[in-house]
Amino acid sequence: MRNYSYKTLDITELYVNPDNYRYVEEVQDEISAIIAMFKVNVGDAKKEMINLANDIITDGLNPFEMPIVCFDDEIGKYVVYDGNRRITCLKLMTQYKGNADVLEELPYVAEIYKLQYDGDNSIQCVVYEEADDAIHFLNKIHNDVNNGIGRKQWDSQAKMKANAAYGNKTKSYAIVEFLKTNQNTSTELLDKMKTNRWISKLERVVSFSLFKDVYNIHFDNNSNMSYLDTEEQVLKMLSKLVDDIIMNTATGNFRFKSDFQGYVDNLPNEYKTQLKKKEDNKTENGSSNTNKDSEGKPSNGAKNSNGAENGTSGGEDDAAKNNQKKEDNDTGVGKPKNIPRKHAQINEALVLCKNYDYSEYECLNEKGKEMMVELESLNIKDYPVAAVALCRCLLEYTLKLWLTEQGGDFNSGKLPSCYNGCVNLLRSKDIIDSKEQSILNTLVNKENFITLLNTWMHADTDACVSETPLISGWKNVRILIEKYIETHKK
């Protein structure tokens, strides 16, 4: 047994640990450690720390998690091994309230200084006699599941359910909820739905505009689901979709609109909305009756050179062609539409720094063009997981283009090493300069952007997609894409 005790300590007796595994660089003292806590590379540290401080003001400290500390003879205080984020917030609201050094480095900490903490400055802690014992239990808590010994994080479904209970329901959860609560859902499908790693695929599918057209399902601002088909038909459609996402490898990950378009093209009509078909039949019948009524009746319109009356059949043919072109664009068939950059103006889309003409994307080939068009028209606030997936796929695709062209080896299973190899190769050939190389190397080696993208895609952590690191990482990644376009301009 490892010796520990419970002790109530004043906030000034505690010392924020400078030797924290979260920090990117080493720090030497408590003030530096507090500043570094706002710069960790997982999630949006600034936003999360401010949120934590506000939560402490509202609900106090979590009674289920006491800080783990150990007395350090050299420092003369209790070094915090677990609970540094909480203690940092408390110190900024008490002991270091208004500290100029912190404020100079982190101006936004003023938001925490403004908070009025009325709680007790005395905190109950778990005190270990030896630092190694404290570190041992720290690893149990934070080092993933640790073969069942450590804290087991919620999977994507558990997180989704918890968020819904807290008033943050997603569209994918609304579908899951519909299937789970419907008494006619097959037990076989319900068993399949207990597996992991398919929710993110469903989330991407729901983000495609084609989803609404195929299934005639709508969501309000609170992600409540509504439909016009019968409940029986909706159950049939969604059961098929979810089952295919889980079981059918042909569906892939639905990373792109074209993936889903291909799936829909091969989907039997019985698994698509029936209401639209009925309305189409009505229209056809109505048109047929109109034609019959007009048979044998004189027309006031003059006939054109093709024998069609002006303003009637000739115009209808032109309108039909125009409508067909519009439908082709809406469904992703044919040449993609011009990129709507409205989201770029308010930082709601991941875009290149320059507004390239569509023809300049030719060097990316059809697949690359499609990804670029879709990414630059996607609102990351509404569809963050889809944006993450597209960002990662475009990065992987661009690396492959560069390495194939410049003579490097590409391996999708070792993306970070391929990325570093590509960056170094481009620098050796003076395609990028030393500053650009430094920026790109930092992105993966220090900021772990590729790891973040993978984490967000598969919802492996508690944190949801954070806009700030996503946008920041993209601004660096896009250097590779822009360089490729610039060097391949005709």
Image: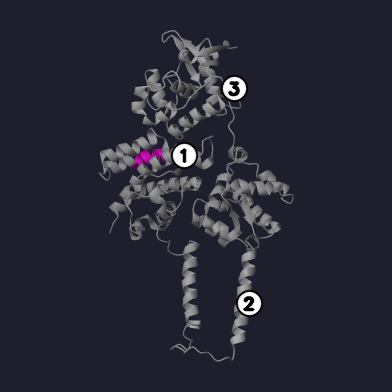
> Which element carries disc 1, helix, strand or loop?
loop
Quadrant of the image occupied by residue 61: top right
Q: How is the image coloured?
A: one colour
Where in the figure is residue 465, as x and y percent of width and height? 49, 40
**Amino acid at pointer 1:** Ser
Dot placed on the residue nearer the N-terminal end, 3 or 1: 3
**Amino acid at pointer 3:** Pro
> Is 484 displayed left or right of 269 in the figure?
left
Where in the figure is residue 471, as x and y percent of width and height? 40, 42
Dot placed on the residue nearer the N-terminal end, 2 or 1: 2
Give the Cα separation between the discs numbered 2 and 1: 52 Å
Q: Is residue 357 visible?
A: yes
**Amino acid at pointer 2:** Asn
Where in the figure is residue 321, as x and y percent of width and height? 47, 74
Rate crowding at label 3 as few (under 14), some (14 to 19) or many (20 or more) other CA atoms within 10 Å.
few
> Is 142 displayed left or right of 246 in the figure?
left
> Which of pointers 3 and 1 indicates the residue nearer the eye?
3
Give the residue at x 54% y 28%.
58
Residue located beneath label 2 in the image: 285
Classify the position of the C terminus by image quarter.
bottom left
Queried whether the magenta region covers residue 397, the answer comes back as no
Give the Cα separation between the discs numbered 3 and 2: 69 Å
Residue located beneath label 3 in the image: 63
Rate crowding at label 1 as few (under 14), some (14 to 19) or many (20 or more) other CA atoms within 10 Å.
some
* 385 is higher (above) or lower (below) than 117: below
* 40 is higher (above) or lower (below) than 188: above
Residue located beneath label 1 in the image: 466
* 481 is higher (above) or lower (below) than 210: above
> Which element carries disc 2, helix, strand or loop?
helix
Instruction: Provide the residue span drawn in magenta.
Output: 415-422
Quadrant of the image occupied by residue 24: top left
Queried whether the magenta region covers residue 420, the answer comes back as yes
